[in-house]
Image: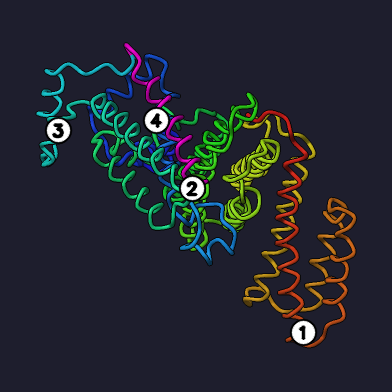
Amino acid sequence: MSREKKIHSGEDSFADVLHSEIIAGSENLTAWIKQIQEQGAIENLFEMETWIKGIRSFFGIDHLPLTAVDRSEIVARNFLPEMRVVRQAILTCESCACEVMKPKVGEKLEFEEFLDIQMRKDRMADFHISRMVEQLTPADSLAQLMVSLNDFRIAVDAYRELDVMDYQLFLSMGRAFERELKNCRYIDMLMSQRFRLQYDLIENKSLANVLQSIQEDAVRRNIALALLYLFRFQKYLDLVHIALDKDRPLKQFLVIFSLLHEEMGILSDFLRARFLRNRDAGNSLRNAADLIAYSLKTDAQRVMENELIYIARETNPVPVYTRIENSHGLLRNCCQSGILTLIQSLDKDFDPAILFPSRTDNLISSERLRQSLWDLRQWLTDVLSNKEDLDSNKIIERLALFKDASLRSLMYRDWAEFEAFSDALAISTNFIEIRTHIRKFVGFLEMLIQEVSKRSIFQDKTPHT
């Protein structure tokens, strides 16, 4: 089949990428998920999976909201506040599991059907015989998970009687949680699947047309996978949004922010690996991928190091709500901007309202400013790396172009500093002096990009799509 026919036949669509990403396929698991979907409980299953993954991420020290001092004195730190967060998250997870286990939801496959599926499998035999006998179906594994979650919560309650939970005990609890997940055969398989057709399939004709316009197979698949990540992050944030809207307890959502921090880091590395070193990706796509990768890492880190610090031990619900709301808004805008930046690098006329009708004109203007700042930052970075000639006249011309197009979109207080950097470069004649000013200017532009992202939280308080 020719490349053009592959593109227009829908090959390498989101569904194809999803199929390739489901790495732990099982007919039993697939049939069970289908039953759950038919009974209308698929969102409960998604929630349960999200909370499990979130708790697992929360036990990773790299994904906890800790100060630099906390990290430097990690061995002496008390982790009881974090364990209280874990307990609330487990309660929420148990509630989701109960919804999935309700009568007529996810009923057991008939034993004969199970045997037929096992005999038809064209793969190596499963040598975990004891687990197979104990957990013949995914419903059996879910029942085992509920027992494990209950046992784990009881253990956490016992430790709450202590005055201090040290670092080693916190890590030990995390390892125990991981072992319990692996002992639930089908739940372990569920966790190993990165995406799922029932949660992640994106059906949008305009978006599909943009993907179909990409000539290179590998580039098209990588873009589809990046979009799947970004839309999945939106689904995680939807859970936070619902809790904010209904004024529910919020501390347990720290585990979902830990999950976002981990997976945003994974996507950032993926974008740099697949696009920045790929000659088949054009300059526009490479610059977009670089901006998205930078924003994901920076905004996820800002949430962990600024917004969510001390929330686990906060007793006043007002700052908890405010910090969670700001973190939600920052990451939501980061993800939506990432989606639009990636698509518009391929189709500059793509209408944001097609995907996000609630995004305001002010927010769209902020995204354009952020892109313009990044383009200038990238151009100056190329000058430093000798991809562009170190010519003072060219630098002045490039700065003048930005001033004419975008300077008015900056806040007035930033104009003076921008002009100061421009003037310093305009009068510099020494090679070393010019490079020093450019490095400082790049740092200033990165700060502005972060500030524009943060302002976007307050420009759009409407419910997201």
In front of the other: 184 or 273: 184
Seen in the image, is 272 located left or right of residue 100?
A: right
Total numbered circles? 4
Mark 3 or 2: the one toward you:
2
The earlier-in-sequence mark between 4 and 2 is: 2
In whole angstroms, how far apart are the C-alphas of marks 4 and 3? Answer: 26 Å
Q: Which residues are magenta?
A: 80-104
Q: Dot 2 corresponds to which residue?
A: 80
In front of the other: 389 or 294: 294
Q: Dot 4 corresponds to which residue?
A: 197
At 70% across and 53% down in the image, what residue appears?
371
Residue 203 vertical placement versus 410 (above, below): above
Q: Amino acid at mark 2?
A: Leu
Element class at badge 3: helix
The earlier-in-sequence mark between 4 and 1 is: 4
At 78% across and 88% down in the image, what residue appears?
430
Seen in the image, is 153 located left or right of residue 213?
A: left
Residue 214 at what x, y percent from top left?
51, 45
Give the dominant element type of the magenta stretch: helix, strand or loop.
helix
Q: Amino acid at mark 1?
A: Glu
Mark 1 or 2: the one toward you:
2
Residue 215 vertical placement versus 432 (above, below): above
